[in-house]
Image: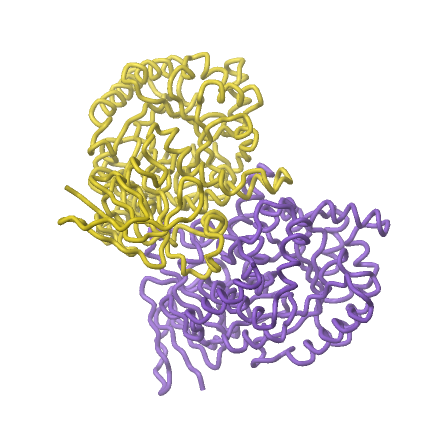
Chain colours: A purple, B yellow
């Protein structure tokens, strides 16, 4: 039985303050947080973390891990051109081995920067799931479906999505769960989206989709279907599901109200939206309306890193500047988006806080770094000053994945080698 | 005589591509860059940097180093309240020793994140200059003057500013130069600004000032003086000097044209402007008009870190998103702002590039980091994926200040101790 005791560790409480306590973890669950000394039991691993602060692991609620192979392939281009002229042709050359190499690289980066849970939407998802099982992260995975193909091909993709849910939902001792993921309304015909909504209903898993990412997408949808994408998605029945929409940059008040009313979670990807010149999602309005807003990096091909600390800082900063309101997204709201709100969107009620009964998905940062001095306001620093590089240790479900900045489950030389091999062909 | 040879090192050329060469540095100057092997001379320090990329050191063109003691003191408040209710009362408690502690902390952070040159505007500037001389950075320093006081006090501050220029301009083998710095038009009466313009003329040094940072500042100035701040500053004669203005968030086309026509450099501080909800400066328009735009972090009290890699990425991203133009501030423009444009504003013609005849102000980053993989597009990664934490080594004027992430001229335990002591009193 796996047992860990953190001795006199500084940690961030669910209330957002720093406390010192002894914390016991049994079989991946936080079972005790106490001021009292915890008696030693044979088999306990006792860990002391001087100069470190324990935080909940971050939840990256939208991404495409295998696209890390395409980092920097094309910058300074708008979404449509970037996707159709650069990403899709390169992705057409991916093999399953390339998907694994890209997923491993993304997990290396995510672990090193403090992410313990990630959502992913891509092809060859069984390969990604196997990599997740091997590495030890927590992930919510889906076979992303682009329906710009024949009905026969669409049906094959639906079958793959079904098989993926059947094979992997709840796998790896529950670390892996599944979703159903039509890529977007502009890449999937309505009938296909309806079919996938049916699959999600049948397997009782959430639906994940890109929605209203660019003004062009919204305008085109109105031309083609006579209504805006969120209205269409609701008509197709998706709002009756647990639904997680990525981006929602171009949404109006009525659409925001409908998100709130139907418990639709929105994944904000501020850096990807800025880089692709898609715009800035109206996050303050969504928070005001009570929408569950969480945070994602999107892929390394449009960001171009997966550092959730940088992402949450961008979320905290950009809305202040463009609304002239310094309280637009306060520090605690940005932190919530990157942790609990993500866990809620991903239906992981025991993830995102350090509290008794929660999963032991925790990370440590070294607070001696100059940019975290003075230490008086660490809850501010983790939002406004820290970066993923401050992370020294990572545990997921009580298993240590990073120990003093060294990977415990990844051979990084091997990953770099595989990445170089894959890229030599894909990016040729 | 100090001599360094970098053997077969990967470096970023002034054209923005990666090349491999042998580089010789003699007495702090790059004297040779060649494909040929460089013959060994007794006394040469030969350095090999496997897995690393040599870049020019970054130029942080606007800041207040001692304010690092106030990091996180007050977040999520607008500039006027933040400054008057929180910063100024704390700063009134600063002693010279506190200024040194804050400056040392800021330099620790800047060196660790790849900045080799910084501009600073603050009080007790002789203490900052001494710290710069001790540590080995390059700095352009000024006694920042707030004129909200009696004429006797104003005159004393002017005398301090003069003494500082006299004592320190060109000191530390030229690593330290001086400027004259009225804090802003809203904190200095016009007569005082005119006096300081006269001082700058007399000593032939540039003028540095905060300008049009908030809409409120501009509106108030129009009410009080019947004209906008840049027009007023020009009328007072500042445009006849070498002039560096910080922020310029709220400027119109005519003001931008005047900046370009008179060679006024603008320091863009995107994260500070976002955090204080001041807005987003019209940088694409300035670049279009030919203004020399450089980059600063502002202080750690409003940012809240001094990482120029994060700053330049924000500059590259935020304008794309709000103008819907993915080419608004291309990668190479952001990099130029953080290096050569800063050097130009600071009148340091031999800083900001790796080329023969330039100062050996160079940094190395470890390109094995997962977020810099694959390595195919490193010039993109340094803008869109890197952070200051990737920096492993720093040289300024040929002297190594950071060696494999260890400081060579700073006792970091001592700095943390001094910072804690100072903060216990200042932030009480």
- The residue located at (55%, 58%) in the rendering is A338
> Could you tell whether A284 is left or right of A158 in the image?
left
Image coords of residue B235 (percent x, y): 46, 12
Q: Where's the N terminus of chain A, which quadrant?
A: bottom left
| A82 displayed left or right of B65 | right
The quadrant holding residue B67 is: top left
Horizontal arrangement in the rendering, residue A3 relative to residue B177 (left or right): right
Which of these two is toward me, A227 or A378? A227
Quadrant of res A204: bottom right
Q: Quadrant of residue A216?
A: top right
Q: Position of residue A177 (x, y in %)?
A: 63, 74
Question: In this view of the protein, which residue sits in the foreground, A39 or A49?
Answer: A49
Residue at 55 percent of width and 22 percent of height? B219
Q: Is residue B297 visible?
A: no
Residue A115: percent from left, percent from top: 50, 64
Outermost residue toward the right? A226
Q: Position of residue A220 (x, y in %)?
A: 79, 47
Point out the residue furthest to the front here: B36
Q: Quadrant of the C terminus of chain A?
A: bottom right
Q: How many marks?
A: 0
On the question of residue A415 being in view, the answer is yes
Q: Is residue B354 above or below residue B408?
A: above
In depth, the one of B377 and B199 nearer the eye is: B377
């Amino acid at each position: 039985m796996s047992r860990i005791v953190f001795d006199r560790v500084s940690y961030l409480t669910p209330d957002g303050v720093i406390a010192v306590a002894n914390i016991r973890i049994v079989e991946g669950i936080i079972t005790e947080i106490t001021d009292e000394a915890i008696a030693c039991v044979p088999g306990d691993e006792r860990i002391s973390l001087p100069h470190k602060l324990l935080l909940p692991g971050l939840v990256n609620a939208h991404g495409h891990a295998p696209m890390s192979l395409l980092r920097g392939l094309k910058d300074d281009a708008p979404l449509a051109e970037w996707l159709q002229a650069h990403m899709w042709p390169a992705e057409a050359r991916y093999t399953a081995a390339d998907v694994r190499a890209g997923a491993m690289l993304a997990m290396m980066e995510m672990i090193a920067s403090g992410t313990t849970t990630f959502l992913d939407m891509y092809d060859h998802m069984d390969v990604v799931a196997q990599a997740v099982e091997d590495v030890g992260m927590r992930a919510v995975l889906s076979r992303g479906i682009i329906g710009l193909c024949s009905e026969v091909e669409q049906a094959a993709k639906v079958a793959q999505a079904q098989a993926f849910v059947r094979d992997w939902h709840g796998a790896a001792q529950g670390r892996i769960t599944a979703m159903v993921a039509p890529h977007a309304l502009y890449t999937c015909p309505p009938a296909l989206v309806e079919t996938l909504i049916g699959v999600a209903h049948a397997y009782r898993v959430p639906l994940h989709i890109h929605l209203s990412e660019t003004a062009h997408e919204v305008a085109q949808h109105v031309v083609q279907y006579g209504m805006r994408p969120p209205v269409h998605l609701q008509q197709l029945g998706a709002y009756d599901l647990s639904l997680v929409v990525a981006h929602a940059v171009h949404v109006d008040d009525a659409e925001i109200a409908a998100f709130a009313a139907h418990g639709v979670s929105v994944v904000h990807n501020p850096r990807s939206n800025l880089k692709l010149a898609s715009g800035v999602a109206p996050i303050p309005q969504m928070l005001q309306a009570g929408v569950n807003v969480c945070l994602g990096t999107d892929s390394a091909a449009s960001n171009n890193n997966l550092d959730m600390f940088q992402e949450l800082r961008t979320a905290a900063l950009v809305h202040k500047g463009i609304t002239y309101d310094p309280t637009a997204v306060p520090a605690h709201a940005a932190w919530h988006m990157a942790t609990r709100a993500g866990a809620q969107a991903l239906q992981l009620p025991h993830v995102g806080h350090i509290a008794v009964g929660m999963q032991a998905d925790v990370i440590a940062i070294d607070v001696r770094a100059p940019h975290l001095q003075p230490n008086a306001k660490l809850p501010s620093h983790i939002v406004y000053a820290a970066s993923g590089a401050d992370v020294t240790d990572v545990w997921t479900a009580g298993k240590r994945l990073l120990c003093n900045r060294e990977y415990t489950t990844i051979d990084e030389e091997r990953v770099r080698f595989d990445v170089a091999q894959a890229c030599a062909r894909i990016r040729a």
